Amino acid sequence: AANGVVIATEKKLPSILVDETSVQKIQSLTPNIGVVYSGMGPDFRVLVRKSRKQAQQYYRLYKETIPVTQLVRETAAVMQEFTQSGGVRPFGVSLLIAGYDDNGPQLYQVDPSGSYFSWKASAMGKNVSNAKTFLEKRYTEDMELDDAIHTAILTLKEGYEGQISANNIEIGVIRADREFKVLTPSEIKDFLEEVE
Amino acid sequence: PQIFEYNGSAVVAMVGKNCFAIASDRRLGVQLQTVATDFQRVFKIHGKLYIGLSGLATDAQTLYQRLAFKHKLYQLREERDMKPETFASLVSALLYEKRFGPYFCQPIIAGLGEKDQPFICTMDCIGAKELAKDFVVSGTASESLYGACESMYKPDMEPEELFETISQALLSSVDRDCLSGWGGYVLIV
């Protein structure tokens, strides 16, 4: 959006007995950068750990929070290493990294190959082609963050089998205050009601 | 022999109105003998950031080379110049890495930050930062420099006046110190 970034994902649980609050697909890397993935959960956890450590190392050296581009670059470098070293396999995840720094709101996609792209709006995973067509029609550069959240929910809804509810999607936002927040189920519920 | 007094040095930096001045002496000695009268102690990192290194001359040169290296990589990666505050943190981290076998230098960092606000700071040889709003001094003549600066300094001086003040402070202090002198080098930004 013009004044922030929103990332959203569906939370498909293997069975209704699983406690959905223990599964967190959207995580923060630094107070002003968040990430969501599509792919293998365990691979994601490893990458999140490494990225957080790199962000902290940068802070220790420069006493400045890491810019989004630098963190994306370093995370992508890690993913690339695993495509070229011996005895390891590439990470089975694609990441969407969202951050707000001195260069404004930014959104990056990182693939298992280690290549990264900056996007104004993007989708990955199941139903990616429909989702992207939907976004191409709906996205405008100067949309407000709340509109962007609506659009994100609508995009998810397009490909969702079954009923969307506040408990089976996750939304993360960064506004101009530069703090990455994962929305609580009750906040998601408010947005869902506006969409209906 | 004292290691900080081996080569002799005097460096001072002062803050003015949207400008700063950094000055150093030009003598390079080996204890009591003068070996050079044109030795450079103030180095440029980028157009708005300078570092002056007093103390052991060989460490000053090596430290400058390492810092220039790190800054060039930073410029290539981040496509921008380093802010003075960030640079100060970098120097501090670099010096503390050698905590138990330090560089025998006392850096003075002077630069223009965002919106051309002047920034100066100094640190000891293992990286303890000391920010100041008016002036910072280091080197063998530091005690005389403290006295001279304290009495001659006024806040918000224009560049021309700042030049006069810092030159007078430097020259009168090094005249009282046998290990530094032989002229001065003043830079105003």
Image (tube, coloured by chain):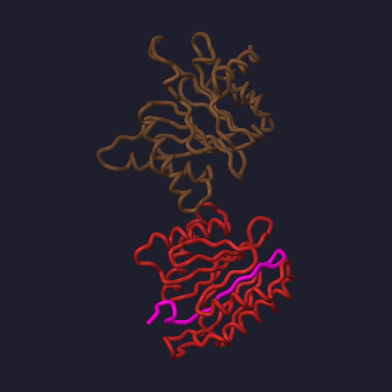
Q: Residue at x 54, y 62 (%)?
A: B130
**Which percent across, then down, holds residue B161?**
73, 75
Write down the quadrant of residue B172 in the picture.
bottom right
Classified by dominant secondary structure, the portion drawn in magenta counts as: loop
The N terminus of chain B lies in quadrant:
bottom left
Write down the quadrant of residue B132 in the picture.
bottom right
* Residue B85 left/right relative to A126: right
* Residue A122 left/right relative to B125: right
Q: Residue at x 66, y 72 (%)?
A: B188
Tell me where the magenta segment starts and ends, as one range. Answer: B1-20
Q: In the image, is residue B2 part of the stretch drawn in magenta?
A: yes
Q: Which chain: brown?
A: A
Q: Nearer the viewer, residue B170 or A172?
A: B170
Q: Residue B27, relative to residue B69: is it above or below?
A: below
**Which percent across, then down, holds residue B159?**
72, 72
**Which percent across, then down, holds residue A166?**
54, 15
The C terminus of chain B lies in quadrant:
bottom right
Q: Residue B1, relative to residue A61: is it above or below?
A: below
**Which percent across, then down, holds residue A115?**
45, 39
**Residue reaching furthest bottom?**
B33
Q: Residue at x 48, y 61 (%)?
A: B128
Q: Which chain: red?
A: B
**Residue reaching furthest left?**
A87
Q: Residue A195, relative to residue A92: is it above or below?
A: above
Q: Nearer the viewer, residue A99 or A58?
A: A58
Q: Residue at x 64, y 70 (%)?
A: B14
Q: How many marks?
A: 0
Q: Nearer the viewer, residue B175 or B186?
A: B175
Q: In the image, is residue B170 part of the stretch drawn in magenta?
A: no
